[in-house]
Image: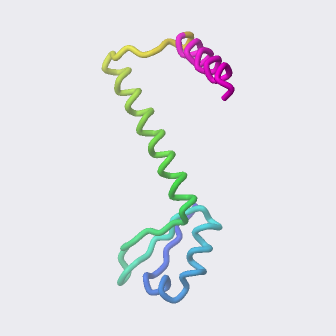
């Protein structure tokens, strides 16, 4: 997908159109000022999803760093067992 680029003056004139473009494309719109990149806007749903994705990527990176540093974690079987126990606790509490 190619970036969506608009001049900053367009946001003042056509806010609703640009906001709808953000929602429809699920992508940021890059605003320029005097021909140079200035600001990025996006709809709240896309922003929230990107923030969630970034947080997940940061957690994965932290886990990979810990693995590379030799920090012990859980084996696949230990993870499965922990999940079974957590599900059983949730079921026992009516959750």
Quarter of the figure with residue 8 = bottom left
Q: How many marks?
A: 0
Q: Is residue 50 above or below residue 31?
A: above
**Residue at 46% of width from left, 71% of height from top?**
30
Residue 75 image offset from top left, x and y in percent = 50, 12
| Residue nearest the viewer, comparing 91 with 12 | 91
Instruction: Give the main secondary structure of the magenta stretch.
Output: helix
Q: Is 22 positioned to the left or the right of 5 in the image? A: right
Residue 94 image offset from top left, x and y in percent = 68, 26
Quarter of the figure with residue 95 = top right
Q: Is residue 91 magenta?
A: yes
Q: Is 37 positioned to the left or the right of 2 in the image? A: left
**Residue at 61% of width from left, 19% of height from top?**
89
**Residue at 45% of width from left, 43% of height from top?**
55
Q: Is residue 44 magenta?
A: no
Q: Is residue 46 above or below residue 54?
A: below
The residues colored magenta run: 78-95
Q: Quadrant of the N terminus?
A: bottom right
């Amino acid at each position: 997908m190619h970036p969506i680029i608009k001049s900053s003056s367009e946001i003042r004139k056509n806010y609703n159109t640009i906001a709808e473009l953000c929602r429809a494309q699920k992508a940021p719109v890059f605003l320029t000022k005097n021909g140079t990149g200035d600001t990025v806007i996006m709809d709240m749903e896309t922003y929230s999803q990107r923030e969630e994705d970034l947080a997940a990527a940061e957690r994965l990176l932290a886990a990979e760093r810990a693995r590379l540093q030799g920090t012990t974690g859980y084996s696949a079987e230990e993870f499965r067992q922990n999940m079974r126990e957590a599900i059983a606790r949730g079921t026992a509490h009516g959750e």
